[in-house]
Amino acid sequence: MGTLLIYGATGYTGRMAAERAKVLGLNFEIAGRDAEPLKALSIQLGVPYRVFTLNERPERYLDSISVLLNFAGPFAQTAEALMNACINAGVDYLDITAEINVYRFAERLGAEAAKSDVMLLPGVGWDVATTDSLAVHVAARVAKPHALSIALQVPGSMSRGSAKSVSEIIGAGPLSRVDGELVSTPETQPRDFDFGDGPVLCAPLPFGDLVTAWHSTGIANIAMYVHISGEAFPEGDLAQLADGPDVAHRDAHKARAVAEVVGAYGEMARSRIETVNGYSFTPVAAVEAARRVMEGERQAGFETAARLFGGGFAETIAGTTITDEAVV
Protein backbone atom coordinates (compact mmCIF):
# COMPACT_ATOMS: atom_id res chain seq x y z
CA MET A 1 0.00 0.00 0.00
CA GLY A 2 2.99 2.32 0.37
CA THR A 3 3.52 5.16 2.84
CA LEU A 4 1.65 8.46 3.08
CA LEU A 5 3.52 11.59 4.11
CA ILE A 6 1.41 14.39 5.60
CA TYR A 7 3.31 17.65 5.14
CA GLY A 8 2.24 20.54 7.36
CA ALA A 9 0.93 18.01 9.87
CA THR A 10 1.21 20.30 12.90
CA GLY A 11 -1.01 22.99 11.42
CA TYR A 12 -4.69 23.41 12.22
CA THR A 13 -6.10 21.13 9.50
CA GLY A 14 -2.99 19.01 9.05
CA ARG A 15 -3.15 17.86 12.66
CA MET A 16 -6.79 16.76 12.24
CA ALA A 17 -5.79 14.87 9.09
CA ALA A 18 -2.94 13.10 10.89
CA GLU A 19 -5.31 12.09 13.68
CA ARG A 20 -7.77 10.80 11.07
CA ALA A 21 -5.06 8.78 9.32
CA LYS A 22 -4.17 7.22 12.68
CA VAL A 23 -7.80 6.26 13.34
CA LEU A 24 -7.96 4.58 9.91
CA GLY A 25 -4.76 2.66 10.57
CA LEU A 26 -2.96 4.05 7.53
CA ASN A 27 0.76 3.60 7.08
CA PHE A 28 1.87 7.24 7.31
CA GLU A 29 4.48 9.66 8.54
CA ILE A 30 4.29 13.36 9.33
CA ALA A 31 6.52 16.18 8.15
CA GLY A 32 7.06 19.92 8.28
CA ARG A 33 9.72 22.49 8.92
CA ASP A 34 9.60 22.79 12.73
CA ALA A 35 11.12 19.92 14.69
CA GLU A 36 9.67 20.44 18.17
CA PRO A 37 5.92 20.37 17.33
CA LEU A 38 6.55 17.49 14.91
CA LYS A 39 8.34 15.50 17.59
CA ALA A 40 5.48 16.07 20.04
CA LEU A 41 2.85 15.01 17.50
CA SER A 42 4.87 11.97 16.45
CA ILE A 43 4.99 10.83 20.09
CA GLN A 44 1.25 11.42 20.47
CA LEU A 45 0.38 9.44 17.33
CA GLY A 46 3.19 6.92 17.45
CA VAL A 47 4.40 7.62 13.92
CA PRO A 48 7.75 8.70 12.45
CA TYR A 49 8.41 12.32 11.48
CA ARG A 50 10.62 14.12 8.99
CA VAL A 51 11.86 17.69 9.25
CA PHE A 52 12.63 19.64 6.09
CA THR A 53 12.07 23.00 4.48
CA LEU A 54 11.45 23.53 0.77
CA ASN A 55 14.53 25.58 0.01
CA GLU A 56 16.85 22.74 -0.99
CA ARG A 57 15.83 19.64 -2.92
CA PRO A 58 12.95 18.38 -0.76
CA GLU A 59 12.87 15.20 -2.88
CA ARG A 60 15.79 14.01 -0.74
CA TYR A 61 13.29 13.54 2.08
CA LEU A 62 10.74 11.54 0.10
CA ASP A 63 12.43 8.14 0.05
CA SER A 64 9.99 5.25 0.67
CA ILE A 65 7.01 7.64 0.31
CA SER A 66 4.28 6.84 -2.24
CA VAL A 67 1.83 9.72 -1.63
CA LEU A 68 2.43 13.22 -0.28
CA LEU A 69 -0.54 15.14 1.15
CA ASN A 70 0.26 18.84 1.55
CA PHE A 71 -1.48 20.94 4.22
CA ALA A 72 1.12 23.71 4.35
CA GLY A 73 -0.42 26.95 3.14
CA PRO A 74 -0.52 29.43 1.68
CA PHE A 75 0.05 26.94 -1.09
CA ALA A 76 1.55 29.52 -3.41
CA GLN A 77 4.60 29.20 -1.16
CA THR A 78 4.76 25.40 -0.94
CA ALA A 79 2.99 23.64 -3.82
CA GLU A 80 5.48 24.37 -6.60
CA ALA A 81 8.48 23.04 -4.66
CA LEU A 82 6.60 19.97 -3.44
CA MET A 83 5.11 19.14 -6.85
CA ASN A 84 8.55 19.29 -8.45
CA ALA A 85 10.00 17.22 -5.62
CA CYS A 86 7.28 14.61 -6.08
CA ILE A 87 7.93 14.41 -9.82
CA ASN A 88 11.64 13.94 -9.16
CA ALA A 89 11.01 11.31 -6.48
CA GLY A 90 8.15 9.41 -8.18
CA VAL A 91 5.59 10.35 -5.51
CA ASP A 92 1.92 11.24 -6.07
CA TYR A 93 1.02 14.76 -4.88
CA LEU A 94 -2.25 15.83 -3.21
CA ASP A 95 -3.23 19.02 -1.40
CA ILE A 96 -6.27 20.89 -0.07
CA THR A 97 -5.84 24.29 -1.70
CA ALA A 98 -8.43 26.44 -3.45
CA GLU A 99 -5.77 28.86 -4.75
CA ILE A 100 -6.26 29.01 -8.51
CA ASN A 101 -2.63 29.65 -9.38
CA VAL A 102 -1.66 26.32 -7.83
CA TYR A 103 -4.06 24.56 -10.23
CA ARG A 104 -2.68 26.47 -13.19
CA PHE A 105 0.82 25.41 -12.20
CA ALA A 106 -0.29 21.79 -11.78
CA GLU A 107 -1.85 21.91 -15.27
CA ARG A 108 1.42 23.12 -16.75
CA LEU A 109 3.33 20.35 -14.96
CA GLY A 110 0.83 17.68 -15.97
CA ALA A 111 2.70 16.34 -18.99
CA GLU A 112 6.00 16.21 -17.11
CA ALA A 113 4.31 14.44 -14.20
CA ALA A 114 2.75 11.90 -16.56
CA LYS A 115 6.16 11.08 -18.04
CA SER A 116 7.37 10.29 -14.51
CA ASP A 117 4.20 8.30 -13.72
CA VAL A 118 3.29 10.83 -11.02
CA MET A 119 -0.17 12.21 -10.31
CA LEU A 120 -0.81 15.83 -9.33
CA LEU A 121 -4.17 16.09 -7.53
CA PRO A 122 -4.70 19.43 -5.81
CA GLY A 123 -8.00 20.23 -4.11
CA VAL A 124 -9.12 17.18 -2.12
CA GLY A 125 -10.87 19.16 0.62
CA TRP A 126 -13.49 21.86 0.98
CA ASP A 127 -13.30 23.71 -1.35
CA VAL A 128 -12.65 22.16 -4.16
CA ALA A 129 -13.57 18.46 -3.97
CA THR A 130 -17.15 19.25 -2.95
CA THR A 131 -17.84 21.74 -5.71
CA ASP A 132 -16.13 19.50 -8.25
CA SER A 133 -18.62 16.75 -7.39
CA LEU A 134 -21.45 19.29 -7.52
CA ALA A 135 -20.36 20.58 -10.94
CA VAL A 136 -20.32 17.08 -12.41
CA HIS A 137 -23.72 16.33 -10.89
CA VAL A 138 -25.49 19.44 -12.17
CA ALA A 139 -23.84 19.27 -15.60
CA ALA A 140 -25.44 15.87 -16.14
CA ARG A 141 -28.90 17.36 -15.67
CA VAL A 142 -29.09 19.24 -18.98
CA ALA A 143 -28.29 18.36 -22.57
CA LYS A 144 -25.21 20.05 -24.03
CA PRO A 145 -24.23 22.13 -20.96
CA HIS A 146 -22.86 25.48 -22.12
CA ALA A 147 -22.22 27.65 -19.04
CA LEU A 148 -21.65 26.89 -15.37
CA SER A 149 -21.81 29.16 -12.33
CA ILE A 150 -20.62 28.01 -8.91
CA ALA A 151 -21.19 29.89 -5.66
CA LEU A 152 -19.50 28.97 -2.41
CA GLN A 153 -20.66 30.01 1.04
CA VAL A 154 -17.97 30.53 3.68
CA PRO A 155 -19.70 30.33 7.09
CA GLY A 156 -18.39 31.58 10.42
CA SER A 157 -14.80 32.49 11.14
CA MET A 158 -11.75 31.60 9.05
CA SER A 159 -8.57 29.91 10.12
CA ARG A 160 -5.32 31.81 9.79
CA GLY A 161 -4.28 29.54 6.91
CA SER A 162 -7.55 30.01 5.03
CA ALA A 163 -7.36 33.78 5.34
CA LYS A 164 -3.87 33.76 3.86
CA SER A 165 -5.03 31.49 1.02
CA VAL A 166 -8.01 33.72 0.25
CA SER A 167 -5.58 36.64 0.02
CA GLU A 168 -3.70 34.67 -2.64
CA ILE A 169 -6.98 34.00 -4.49
CA ILE A 170 -7.94 37.67 -4.43
CA GLY A 171 -4.46 38.53 -5.66
CA ALA A 172 -4.96 36.37 -8.77
CA GLY A 173 -7.32 39.06 -10.07
CA PRO A 174 -10.81 38.84 -11.63
CA LEU A 175 -10.89 35.66 -13.71
CA SER A 176 -13.52 33.55 -15.45
CA ARG A 177 -13.36 30.80 -18.04
CA VAL A 178 -14.66 31.98 -21.40
CA ASP A 179 -14.78 29.64 -24.39
CA GLY A 180 -12.35 27.34 -22.63
CA GLU A 181 -9.79 29.99 -21.73
CA LEU A 182 -9.07 31.68 -18.42
CA VAL A 183 -9.40 35.40 -19.03
CA SER A 184 -9.56 38.56 -16.95
CA THR A 185 -13.19 39.60 -16.46
CA PRO A 186 -13.26 42.74 -14.30
CA GLU A 187 -16.73 43.48 -15.63
CA THR A 188 -18.28 40.50 -13.80
CA GLN A 189 -20.79 41.77 -11.24
CA PRO A 190 -21.88 40.25 -7.93
CA ARG A 191 -25.11 38.28 -8.10
CA ASP A 192 -27.56 36.53 -5.81
CA PHE A 193 -27.52 32.81 -5.02
CA ASP A 194 -29.78 30.88 -2.66
CA PHE A 195 -27.94 28.43 -0.38
CA GLY A 196 -31.21 27.35 1.23
CA ASP A 197 -32.18 30.33 3.37
CA GLY A 198 -33.04 32.85 0.67
CA PRO A 199 -30.92 34.78 -1.86
CA VAL A 200 -27.68 36.39 -0.70
CA LEU A 201 -25.25 38.51 -2.68
CA CYS A 202 -22.11 36.70 -3.83
CA ALA A 203 -18.96 38.32 -5.16
CA PRO A 204 -16.93 36.95 -8.08
CA LEU A 205 -13.71 35.32 -6.89
CA PRO A 206 -11.40 32.98 -8.87
CA PHE A 207 -11.24 29.79 -6.83
CA GLY A 208 -9.61 26.65 -8.24
CA ASP A 209 -12.99 25.50 -9.58
CA LEU A 210 -12.30 27.53 -12.71
CA VAL A 211 -9.72 24.85 -13.50
CA THR A 212 -11.19 21.70 -11.98
CA ALA A 213 -14.74 22.16 -13.30
CA TRP A 214 -13.36 22.66 -16.81
CA HIS A 215 -11.45 19.39 -16.67
CA SER A 216 -14.21 17.47 -14.87
CA THR A 217 -17.20 18.64 -16.96
CA GLY A 218 -15.77 20.01 -20.22
CA ILE A 219 -17.96 23.11 -19.85
CA ALA A 220 -16.18 25.98 -21.58
CA ASN A 221 -17.77 28.93 -19.76
CA ILE A 222 -17.43 29.01 -15.97
CA ALA A 223 -17.85 31.74 -13.37
CA MET A 224 -17.10 31.43 -9.64
CA TYR A 225 -18.62 33.39 -6.76
CA VAL A 226 -18.35 33.43 -2.97
CA HIS A 227 -20.45 34.66 -0.06
CA ILE A 228 -18.65 35.14 3.23
CA SER A 229 -21.33 34.91 5.91
CA GLY A 230 -21.11 35.77 9.59
CA GLU A 231 -17.78 37.47 10.19
CA ALA A 232 -16.32 39.56 7.37
CA PHE A 233 -13.00 38.66 5.80
CA PRO A 234 -10.38 39.45 8.45
CA GLU A 235 -8.22 42.53 8.03
CA GLY A 236 -4.87 43.55 9.43
CA ASP A 237 -2.04 41.18 10.26
CA LEU A 238 -3.38 37.74 9.31
CA ALA A 239 -0.53 36.08 11.21
CA GLN A 240 -2.24 37.20 14.43
CA LEU A 241 -5.41 35.21 13.72
CA ALA A 242 -6.25 32.09 15.72
CA ASP A 243 -5.30 28.71 14.27
CA GLY A 244 -8.95 28.02 13.48
CA PRO A 245 -12.47 27.66 14.88
CA ASP A 246 -13.12 25.26 17.75
CA VAL A 247 -15.35 22.19 17.54
CA ALA A 248 -18.47 23.99 18.78
CA HIS A 249 -18.03 26.73 16.19
CA ARG A 250 -17.50 24.19 13.41
CA ASP A 251 -20.55 22.19 14.45
CA ALA A 252 -22.68 25.35 14.30
CA HIS A 253 -21.76 26.27 10.72
CA LYS A 254 -22.36 23.87 7.86
CA ALA A 255 -20.70 24.39 4.50
CA ARG A 256 -22.84 24.91 1.40
CA ALA A 257 -22.42 25.64 -2.28
CA VAL A 258 -24.71 26.13 -5.28
CA ALA A 259 -24.06 25.33 -8.92
CA GLU A 260 -26.24 26.15 -11.89
CA VAL A 261 -25.76 25.13 -15.49
CA VAL A 262 -27.30 26.53 -18.65
CA GLY A 263 -27.66 24.25 -21.65
CA ALA A 264 -27.09 25.11 -25.30
CA TYR A 265 -30.86 25.37 -25.79
CA GLY A 266 -31.41 27.71 -22.85
CA GLU A 267 -32.60 25.21 -20.23
CA MET A 268 -31.18 25.71 -16.74
CA ALA A 269 -30.66 23.37 -13.78
CA ARG A 270 -29.52 24.23 -10.28
CA SER A 271 -28.24 21.97 -7.48
CA ARG A 272 -27.01 22.61 -3.96
CA ILE A 273 -24.51 20.71 -1.84
CA GLU A 274 -24.42 20.82 1.95
CA THR A 275 -21.94 19.18 4.25
CA VAL A 276 -20.37 19.50 7.66
CA ASN A 277 -18.23 22.53 8.30
CA GLY A 278 -15.45 22.85 5.76
CA TYR A 279 -12.78 22.50 8.43
CA SER A 280 -14.36 19.24 9.53
CA PHE A 281 -14.91 17.97 5.98
CA THR A 282 -11.41 18.67 4.69
CA PRO A 283 -9.26 16.35 6.85
CA VAL A 284 -11.70 13.47 6.37
CA ALA A 285 -12.00 13.93 2.60
CA ALA A 286 -8.28 14.53 2.10
CA VAL A 287 -7.24 11.42 4.01
CA GLU A 288 -9.90 9.38 2.21
CA ALA A 289 -8.55 10.60 -1.14
CA ALA A 290 -5.00 9.72 -0.08
CA ARG A 291 -6.12 6.28 1.08
CA ARG A 292 -7.76 5.59 -2.27
CA VAL A 293 -4.69 6.75 -4.18
CA MET A 294 -2.49 4.53 -2.01
CA GLU A 295 -4.75 1.60 -2.91
CA GLY A 296 -4.26 2.21 -6.61
CA GLU A 297 -6.94 4.73 -7.67
CA ARG A 298 -4.64 7.02 -9.59
CA GLN A 299 -3.91 8.37 -13.04
CA ALA A 300 -0.56 9.90 -13.93
CA GLY A 301 -0.56 13.60 -14.80
CA PHE A 302 -2.84 16.40 -13.62
CA GLU A 303 -6.13 15.15 -12.18
CA THR A 304 -9.27 16.40 -10.45
CA ALA A 305 -11.11 14.69 -7.61
CA ALA A 306 -14.34 14.18 -9.56
CA ARG A 307 -12.61 12.94 -12.68
CA LEU A 308 -10.48 10.49 -10.72
CA PHE A 309 -12.93 9.24 -8.09
CA GLY A 310 -16.22 9.98 -9.85
CA GLY A 311 -18.77 12.72 -9.33
CA GLY A 312 -20.11 11.06 -6.19
CA PHE A 313 -16.87 11.44 -4.23
CA ALA A 314 -18.06 14.27 -1.98
CA GLU A 315 -21.18 12.34 -1.00
CA THR A 316 -19.03 9.47 0.31
CA ILE A 317 -18.07 11.80 3.19
CA ALA A 318 -20.59 11.56 6.03
CA GLY A 319 -23.00 14.47 6.31
CA THR A 320 -22.82 15.46 2.63
CA THR A 321 -25.96 15.73 0.51
CA ILE A 322 -26.84 17.16 -2.92
CA THR A 323 -30.30 18.63 -3.50
CA ASP A 324 -31.71 19.35 -6.97
CA GLU A 325 -34.00 22.13 -8.05
CA ALA A 326 -36.31 21.67 -11.00
CA VAL A 327 -34.94 22.06 -14.52
CA VAL A 328 -36.43 25.17 -16.16
Image (cartoon, rainbow, N blue to C red):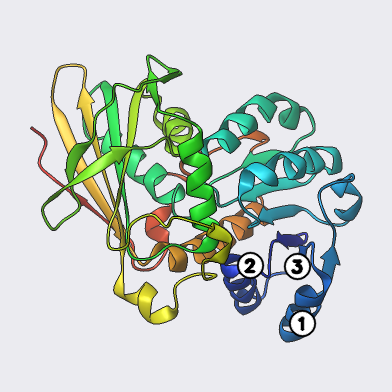
- Residue in the image at 24% along x and 29% along y: 189
Q: Nearer the viewer, mark 2 or mark 3?
A: 2
| Secondary structure at numbered mark 1 | helix
Q: Residues within 10 Å of mark 3 (few under 14, many from 20)?
A: many
**At which x and y percent is residue 196?**
15, 56
Q: Residue furthest top?
A: 179
**At which x and y percent is residue 171?**
50, 36
| Secondary structure at numbered mark 2 | loop
- Left or right of 293 on screen, residue 134: left
Quarter of the N terminus within the rendering = bottom right
The residue that label 2 is drawn on is: 11
| N-terminal-most mark, 3 or 1 | 3
Q: Which mark is residue 40?
A: 1
The reply to whether callout 3 and callout 1 are in contact (CB within 8 Å) is no
Q: CA distance from mark 2 to mark 1?
A: 13 Å
- Residue in the image at 25% along x and 43% along y: 202
Amino acid marked by disc 1: Ala
Q: In front: 223, or 262? A: 223
| N-terminal-most mark, 2 or 3 | 2
The residue that label 3 is drawn on is: 30
**Would you say residue 47 is visible in this rendering?**
no
Amino acid marked by disc 2: Gly
Q: Residues within 10 Å of mark 1 (few under 14, many from 20)?
A: few
Q: Residues within 10 Å of mark 2 (few under 14, many from 20)?
A: many
The reply to whether callout 2 and callout 1 are in contact (CB within 8 Å) is no
Q: Against 57, is 316 above or below?
A: below
Quarter of the C terminus within the rendering = top left
